[in-house]
Amino acid sequence: MFQSLSEIAALLNAGEIAAIPTETVYGLAAQALNPHAVEKIFRAKGRPSDNPLIVHVADVGMAESLVTSISPDARRLMEAFWPGPLTVILPKAGLVPDIVTASLPNIALRIPNHDTAIALIKETGPLAAPSANKSGKPSPTSAFHVEQDFGPSLPVLDAGPCDVGIESTVVGFIENTPVIFRPGSISATMISGILGKTVMNAQPFAGTGLPPQSPGMKYTHYSPLARVCWWDGQKPGKDDMLITISSGMKSGNLFSFDGDFEAFARSLYDSFRQADFLQKKRVLIEPFQPDAHSIAPALLNRINKAAGLDS
Ligand code: TXA
Ligand code: MG
């Protein structure tokens, strides 16, 4: 059910959940400081309770009210990339309910680069919001996708399709080393350019039990019903959807990007959903070289996860 900003703000302020736009993907929001409201997010999504939520704030002051401290490096990243698709992990303040952080001592925070979202958060205060998909499904990049997963009864603030199309980069610190827990459009190169130090990737830490972990890493994500595979160059069959990245249009493919990785990111999840709508059995994706300076490594991460090739 599509509703206005003031209607959505009133619902959230009354402890209800609603889907909200951001520049990355749509989020399923509740007031972060109301544990009963946040519990509704977990129930609606079918989300495991050990997977913490990102909290969205309207300005740095609101972020400061939710944490005990901000290291100089964390502050540099916030200054460089907020508002924007960078989620920063910081030590949480006592007023943040445990359900938000899955009882972890840290909270994940970002200011979305989206005027409507920021205007809403000014009305509601901090909003906890995971992506507004059922757990395991591709993230929604339009209000229509949200309705596909939750039906017409869920209130949605529709602000058109998302600009980025894949979820934010999640960055934390182990000792003083910056660690990317989830790659996104803010790349490791961009982060190390600001901090002047090497950025680690969290993948080697997965499953080692070394703290701090980002619990979302262990869940299968982003999968359509169709099987996602890398294209081996064979002629696709009628049950296949082919996505070419740089080799131009081929007969029978719906998506072709001429090397434009930003455009590919914007429609990746929509292509997964369209494959299911068209009852395709496979999504074949043309392999590409991940250039560390671009969004390509994040796309590689999402595709490998959808293909079940990555934990
Ligand atoms: O772009 C995005 O980040 C979108 C929009 C709505 O903002 N949100 C999103 O949320 O993708 P979600 O819940 O689908 O993914 C959040 C990720 C998960 O991998 C989770 O484990 C990690 O962030 N995370 C959240 N809180 C954390 C914490 N305190 N420590 C470590 N990782 C955390
Ligand atoms: Mg998600």
Image (spheres, rainbow, N blue to C red):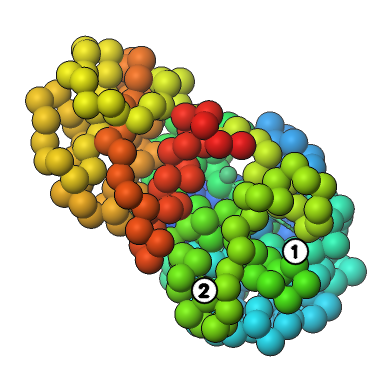
Residue 118 in view of the camera: no
Dot 2: few (<14), some (14–19), or many (≥20) neighbours within 10 Å?
many
Image height of 216 relative to 295, above or below:
above
Residue 311 in view of the camera: yes
Cβ of mark 1 under 8 Å from ligand 1: the answer is yes
Q: Residue 164 vs residue 238: left or right?
A: right
Rendering coords of residue 293 (x, y %): 38, 66
Of residue 261 and residue 7, the one placed in the foreground of this image is 261
Helix, strand or loop for disc 2: helix
Q: The C terminus appears in which quarter of the rendering? A: top right
Alpha carbon separation for disc pair 1 and 2: 19 Å
Q: Residue furthest top?
A: 238
Helix, strand or loop for disc 1: strand
Residue at 22% across, 37% down = 244
Dot 1: few (<14), some (14–19), or many (≥20) neighbours within 10 Å?
many
Which labelled disc corresponds to residue 107? 1
Q: Quadrant of residue 94?
A: bottom right
Q: Which numbered disc, 1 or 2, marks the residue closer to the eye?
A: 2
Which labelled disc corresponds to residue 191? 2
Q: Residue 163 vs residue 221: left or right?
A: left
Residue at 64% across, 55% down = 202
Residue at 79% across, 64% down = 106
Rendering coords of residue 29 (x, y %): 62, 52
Rendering coords of residue 231 (x, y %): 29, 28
Quadrant of the picture in which ligand 2 is shown:
top right
Image height of 242 relative to 15, above or below:
above
Three-letter amino acid code at disc 1? Answer: Ile
Three-letter amino acid code at disc 2? Answer: Ile
Which labelled disc corresponds to residue 184? none
Rendering coords of residue 279 (x, y %): 33, 15
